[in-house]
Amino acid sequence: MKNISNWKFKKWVNWIENSPSDIPTDIWNYINLEIYPEDIEIISTILLPITFEYKGVILLNIEGIYEKEISEMYDKGLLNMVNKVEAQESMNRLVVNDIFLNTADKSSDDTIMNVAELIKHNWEYHLMKKYPNRHFKVEIVGESFYPVVTFYEP
């Protein structure tokens, strides 16, 4: 992941530096003072997603409540795809900007790409641990300003 220097952190640093506070303006103090555990807890549903096996492929079900609907979409999509690999890759796409639908436009392309890299890294680890006998390809596809994270079994 690249060096973190986003607008929220910069704004906080500026505020601290222009206040009578003597708080150090580093990432650690920013986290201590501005980030809630509940935010991390909610984001963990994306970083460690729920997946399930259907017809021999692993599918993404981030909320854990749409297995039937996702299975039906996979079956319908498979009719229009070249093979199971293409169908799996298509079904397991997560558009990073869509996660932050109301706030992504305030973030830089670098920040959005850093988040995509974080998701990719976590999915690689999660899939490896949950399915140790399977091999997955986790990729970031799309444009740098609109990245999509996906996984499939080649």
Image (cartoon, helix red, strand yellow):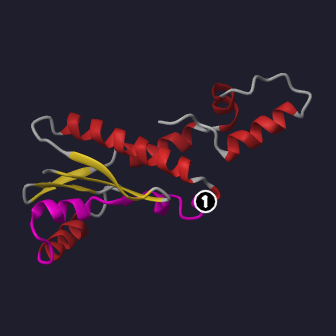
Task: Decide: is 129 above or below 50.
Answer: above
* Amino acid at dot 1: Thr
Q: Position of residue 29 (x, y in %)?
A: 68, 26
Which residue shows up at 31% across the image and 55% down it? 64
Residue 71, above or below 49: below
Q: Residue at x 46, y 56 (%)?
A: 144
Q: In this orientation, which residue lies closer to the viewer: 67 or 75?
A: 75
How far across and down, in percent of the image, does residue 40 sit? 51, 40
Q: Is residue 42 left or right of residue 30?
A: left
Q: Residue furthest front?
A: 143
- Helix or strand or loop: what does disc 1 sit on? loop
Rendered residue at 90%/32% (across/down)? 19
Compared across the picture, whether 62 is left or right of 103 comes to left
The answer to whether residue 45 is seen in the rendering is no
Comparing 126 with 117, the one in front is 117
Is residue 51 found left or right of 45 in the rendered image?
A: left
Magenta stretch holds residue 97: yes
Q: Residue drawn at (64%, 58%), measured in percent from left and top?
A: 106
Q: Report how many numbered discs are placed on residues in the image.
A: 1
Q: Is residue 109 left or right of residue 86?
A: right
In the depicted structure, whether residue 93 falls above or below residue 138: below
Q: Is residue 109 visible?
A: yes
Q: Which residue is mark 1?
A: 103
Q: Is residue 24 magenta?
A: no
Label 1 crowd (10 A; few <14 / some 14-19 / many >=20):
few
Q: Which residues are magenta?
A: 79-104
Q: Observer-nearest residue: 15 or 32? A: 15
How far across and how far down the image is residue 130, in percent? 20, 38
- Compared with 37, 52 (above or below) is below
Q: Quadrant of residue 66?
A: bottom left
Q: Position of residue 85 (x, y in %)?
A: 13, 59
